[in-house]
Amino acid sequence: MAILDREGRVEINILASQIAAHAPFGGVVPELASREHLRALPVLVQQAVGSVASPVELVAVTAGPGLVGALLVGVRFAAAFAWGSSLPLIAVDHLEGHLVSPFLDLGGEAARPEPERVLALVASGGHSSWYLMQDGVRRRLGQTRDDAAGESFDKVAQVLGVGYPGGPALDGLARSGRSTAVDLPRPRLKDAPFDFSFSGLKSAAIRWIREQKLAAAGDGGAAEVADFAASFEAAVVDQLLGPLDELAAQHQPELVTAAGGVAANTLLRERLSAWGNDRGVEVLLPVRALTTDNAAMIAHAGQIGYRDGHQDDPRRLDARGRKAWQPPGMRAAAEMCRVESSGEAEDR
Ligand code: KG4
Ligand code: ZN
C-alpha cells in the first residue's frame, strides 16, 4: 500500500510481507496468497490513509498479470474503496509498475519524468524482458523463452537448500565466491538474438549441485557453495545483459534502466553501472526497496495513466480465473501499457 503526492513523491510505502507464510513451501502457494491479502489489506489501507494529511484523490490497483485469487482480492477491495469514496479508479498492469519504478525516489524527491527513449530490463520471478519505452509506448524487444531469471534463482536456491526467496540468498553467498569457479552454460538463441533462455543453465546448475553433493545444509563446503553461487549469478547476469550492446546500438537510448526483483542483484547492478560508465550512457536503477513488488510503483503508473486520460469503472473491474485472463475494464496489457510486440502476450 502506497500513497504518492501529485508530483510522485512517495509519502507512504508499506508492505505486508508474505515471505514467512510461503517459505515453508519453497514458493508462493496461491490460496495462501489470497488469504494473506484479505487479512492484510484493510489494516494497511487504514494505516496508510490515516497517516497522510491530504485526502486521497485517485485509487490505482494492480489488475494483472499474476495469481488470479490474489489479484481478485486487491481489485475488489480497491474498486469498493473507490466506489464508496467517489474516487476515480485506475487498473494498472504489474509490468508497467516495474517499468516506472526507477523514476521514483524514497528520499522525498518528486518522481523523475520519463525521458524520450529508455531501454529497460524487467527481470523478476515471472518475467525477463527488454523493453523500449518511447513517447509513452512500450515495445518489447526481447524476452525469456522459458524460465524467468528470478524463477531460476529460486529453483536453484531451493535445490541447494539455501532458502526462499532464492535470489537474495544466492546474492549474499555469491559475494564471497569466485564467479569463474564453475563453468555453466550461457546458451544464446540463433534465431532470436534478443531473447534469452534460462532452463538449460538451471538444469546444468541443478545437475552440478547433485553431482557435487553441494546442498548447503551440511557443515563444511562453504567456499564451494559460495563459488557455485557466484558462478551461477554471473551466468544469469550474462544471459540478461547479453543483448544489451546490440539493443543500445540499435536504439540509442538516453537512459538504460533495470527493474523487478532481480534488479536488486548486486552483480547485475554493478555490471550495468559499469556498462553505463564505459559507454557514456546514463543508467538508472530503482532503489533496492522498489525493485521487488511494491505499491509505490503501481500508484505512480496509475497517476501517469490517469494523467493520460485513462480510468476504469469500479462496477465493472473484476477478475476471472482463466489463464489468459483479462478483467473486464482492464485495458488489455497491450493497450494499458501500449505494448507493441509481435511476440505472444505474457500471461503469467
Ligand atoms: O518483482 P518481484 O518482487 O516479483 C515478481 O514480479 O515476480 O521479483 C521477485 C524475484 C524472486 O524470484 C527473487 O528471488 C528475485 O526477484 N530477487 C533477486 C534478488 N532479490 C530478489 N534475484 C537476484 N538477486 C537478488 N538480490
Ligand atoms: Zn513483480
Image (cartoon, helix red, strand yellow):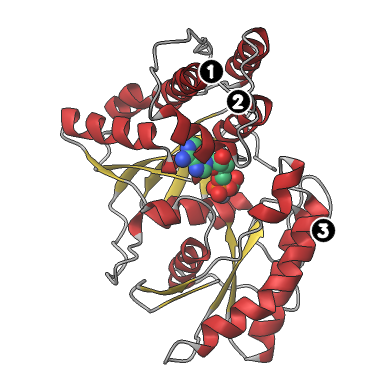
Q: Measuring 36% from the left and 54% from the top, which residue is drawn there? A: 287
Please, what secondary structure does the residue beneath circle 1 have?
A: loop
Q: As displayed, is residue 300 above or below residue 189?
A: below
Q: Which mark is residue 216?
A: 2
Instruction: Kindly identify the residue that appears in the image at 39 percent across and 46 percent down.
Output: 133
User: x%, y% of residue 313?
Assistant: 68, 76
Q: Is residue 90 left or right of residue 53?
A: right
Is 172 rendered above or below residue 331? Answer: above
Task: Look at the numbered disc 3 and give the secondary structure of its residue.
Answer: loop
Mark 3 sits on what residue? 320
Disc 3/disc 1 C-alpha distance (Å) = 48 Å
Quarter placement of the N terminus: bottom right
Q: Residue farthest to the front?
A: 219
Mark 3 or 1, closer to the camera: 1
Pinpoint residue 304: horizontal percent, then vertical percent: 43, 67
Distance between the alpha carbons at the discs numbered 1 and 2:
8 Å
Question: Residue drawn 79% across and 57% down?
Answer: 32
Specify the label residue 221 is tagged with: 1
Percent position of residue 227, x then y: 45, 18
Position in image of residue 99 (x %, y %): 45, 50
Give the quadrant of residue 347. top right
